[in-house]
Amino acid sequence: MGPESLEAKQKAAIEEVLKAYPSKAAKNRAKHLGVGSPEDESQKTCGNVRSNKKTVPGVMSQRGCAYAGSKGVVWGPVKDMVHISHGPIGCGQYSRAGRRNYYIGTTGVDTFVTMNFSSDFQEKDIVFGGDKKLAVCFEEIDELFPLNNGITVQSECPIGLIGDDINATSKQYAKKTGNTIVPVNCEGFRGVSQSLGHHIANDTVRDYVFDGNIDTLGEAIEQTDYDVAIIGDYNIGGDAWSSRILLEEMGLRVVAQWSGDATLKEMAATPKVKLNLLHCYRSMNYISRHMEKEFGIPWVEYNFFGPSQTIKSLRKIAAFFDESIQAKCEEVIAKYQPMIDAVTEKYRPRLEGKQVMLFVGGLRPRHVIGAYEDLGMEVIGTGYEFAHDDDYKRTKDEIFRSTVIYDDVNEYELEAFVKKLEPDLVASGIKEKYVFQKMGLPYRQMHSWDYSGPYHGYDGFAIFAADMDLAINSPVWGHSKAPWESEGEA
Amino acid sequence: MQEVDNIMNGQKLFQRPEYQDVLKKKKEFEGGYGAVNPEKVKEIAEWTKTWDYREKNLAREAITVNPAKACQPLGAVMVALGFEETMPYVHGSHGCVAYFRSYFTRHFKEPTPCVSDSMTEDAAVFGGLVNMKDGLKNCAAVYKPKMIAVSTTCMAEVIGDDLYAFATAAKEEDGGEYLPEDYPITYAHTPSFTGSHITGYDNMMHGIMSQLTEGVEEKKNDKINIIPGFETYIGSIRSIKSIVESFGAEYTMLGDHSDQWDMPAGDYKMFAGGTTIEDAKDCKNSKATISLQKYATVKTMKMVTKRWKQKESANLNPIGLKGTDEFVMKIAELTGKEVPEKLKTERGRLVDAMQDSYPYMHGKKFAIWGDPDFLIGAVSFLLEMGAEPTHVLCHNAPRGWEEEMRALLDTSPAAADLNVWAGKDLWHMRSLLFTEPVDFMIGNSYGKELMRDTGVPLIYIGFPIFDRHHLHRYSISGYDGALNLLTWITNKVLDQLDEDTKGIASTDYFFDLIR
């Protein structure tokens, strides 16, 4: 199939998908669907799609809310703090330990990531307000978990609606105890997706961590010229560790990683690093920009999915430092090359030419494209749950040829696109997983690496390659049709 | 570094020396306690196991830690998926729906359709009417469900949106294009800050049953309605059907979500199985309604007995031998038929199996937690086996449950040592397990942390179960369900016995081949 016919097929698929909607919704959705073309200079964003707008009501969007962005992504993985889901019981329970933010620590004693702390609002708290209850929560947490290094308050919907003042309650308690107490106004109804939650959470890092009192967190870190921080890596399945090892091997000193396996002290120490390394642009560009403006720390985006992008990124990072680092960077690249060659040699023949459709959160809709291409695979459709225009601009550089781009795609559209474009693999989140598996389509859950991983870095790529092979070449996909169903064969 | 012929994922990869080195180096920047002072961590860890800590922990008034309950709309979504081609529609922000879908999907390993009308700040200020008007229309146009079942989130409840008025307004504005006058839009208010997921189940079931039957001609028939409740064991629903069918009884399973969460591979269709709308409309005319989960259907059953005057209706709990016997006898009574041979044989086989295995359960101490109705049934079965349910914990215990459980435990010779913990969470349970230890735990996946911390083996029975596969496909109800419970529990006891006695040349004299 030539590029032209693929593009035509992609455009036709979009047109057909739009027909199911009532006119108002169709008009809205048309702006979020497009065919991205790397050569087309006129495209302002990839596929000219519009993004970060309200979801059409009544469809099965895959989006989460601001609370999910703050508690589930940015703050939740910070391991030595207690994060209170403030409001009714549900949000905390549903978001408990679902993201595989790996960490090392004694859970319930000095680390708390996989636990669920909730103020469990009852009707009386809605009627009379929950500030008093919150104050008691702080005390009880400090009594029962004395080794916590701070508390965050993650607001659920009712908090903003009933007018509770969590900021005042937090401030009062912080003043009394000298502890770090961070109120986060991340009510789920704010904004159009989890994206605003990331931004709100970033702002509270700025206000309560950078400007806060962290004297109790141990001795100050002596600075070196090679101090860097990993920003926007949530250590899904250990991603940050398989990234960190490469940075350390090239002579850099990683003094903080955000927010997977992070501690409050690491975050507080970050404004003194020489360079911020930003992986998930969408969720943490805000705080990186702030550190650049306030503390003069440059930041650089990097991508550790697949060897091509990893090599590019390692060199880009090394370029910020002196020749010794650059030389070591080349040594690192050379050291891993034989392993990567062996992995590619083994798996590429099994995956070559396979087509993939993606729909993942964060930056992955563009970042993983290169990893698939390193294995000879092609991404023919991709899109984001909660991206902004700048994400789609960045996507344009990653795609190889015409690709369907779908912003905030819903279950109906994704299913229709998959049926029309017939990819060999679908890779997205848990909610969609079994829809495609039922159809007999190989699938990988790319929010939490389908309980495998890590996928970052060189070691991660080997796992990624093995997992994609496992997905596409498993015999189980051949069992869907019963033998008595096959046609025409004598 | 990876080796191509032995690619290892994180589980083993991070044990390699180069990664242990990375983690060690990271510690110098971590600050706080763990990295700086491992002794302090150990000291506090030990303190959390003491009676002193337990007293402080049980005295908690405000913070909930590791709950064993969820919120109302989750239950409402389950009800909706039990009716033929019905789309659960949540009036509120889509964040909640993303959570409900993920939660069920992770448990069942099945797709879970559900839409929301994506309310945001403007809806918080002006109300969600516009969202509802557009949302119902879009939902009907795109997914073409036969019914839309609307529930609310805490956001919609706090701002006070009126579902009946909104649904009516949506139909009016649509003018019949996508939402004709007679299109069933059922609804229930399900505030997340009242009760738990079982309250939401009750509210939505009540909503659908009362609203669908409105204006339906009264014409009594001989059918029996059965309401499964917040049933997460797909096989249980099938077991119950099989019992009722063996009597040749005519019945309607109201809210039958068994096919929806157990779809065969092949062509994906969004909806499968479920109570037909026709049957649901007729449910008022049945002669009796049997609820299999009393505490999950309080409001619904009140309507059935008081308003519909189905006098022979009853709450029954067919988990374990006695529970199943009572259910079977009730069906016999309602149908006026003898208990079929098939069931007599099944019962006999179960009792035989119980007699085969009882020594391994007898006198064993169990901690168990879960939903109120599940606990009544499961504890009843443990007692039938001579086991000792030392800690029975129900976080979402409704009124009356604690007394009923106490009365049940009082039938045991060990009654004085058996404790009921209503309204407590799993961090409370952790303290109880340290201070008054048990032999085994029965509960959901959240118990694995308790297992790690306390060393008590966990038998996975309950909801949610995220980290073990396919248990939900089995039954825990009926005689076959009791046999499953018996098998899972006994064999875990035997697994543990083997584990404890496998020491070569030290304990393996008890590592018996035959048990």
Image (spheres, helix red, strand yellow):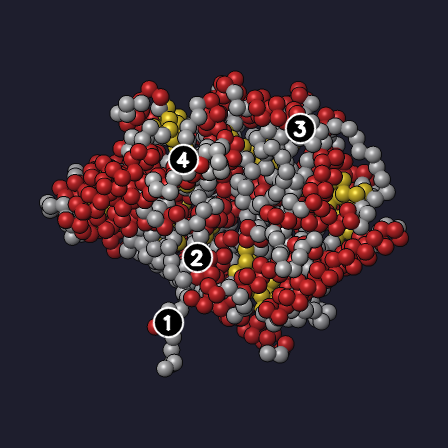
Chain containing the residue with disc 1: A
The answer for how far apart the CA atoms under marks 4 and 2 are is 63 Å
Relative vertical location of residue B214 with respect to residue A214 in this rendering, above or below: below
| Chain on which label 3 sits | B
Residue type at mark 2 is Cys
User: In the image as oriented, which residue stretches furthest toward the front?
Assistant: B505
Crowding at dot 4, Cα within 10 Å, few <14 / some 14-19 / many 20+, comes out as few
Disc number placed over residue B510 in the picture, else none: 4
Tell me the SS state at disc 2.
helix
Reading the image, the residue beneath label 1 is A483
Distance from disc 1 to disc 4, alpha carbons, whole Å, reads: 49 Å
- Kind of residue at disc 3: Pro
Asked if badge 1 and badge 3 are on a common chain, one would say no
Is residue B157 visible in the rendered image? The answer is: no
In the image, what residue occupies the spot 30% across and 26% down? Answer: B409
Q: Which quadrant holds the N terminus of chain A?
A: bottom right
> What chain letter is assigned to the residue under label 2?
B
Measure the C-alpha gap from mark 1 to mark 3. 61 Å
Q: Residue furthest right?
A: A323
1 or 4: mark nearer the eye: 4
**Whether label 1 touches label 4, CB < 8 Å:** no
In terms of depth relative to the viewer, which is nearer, A149 or A13? A149
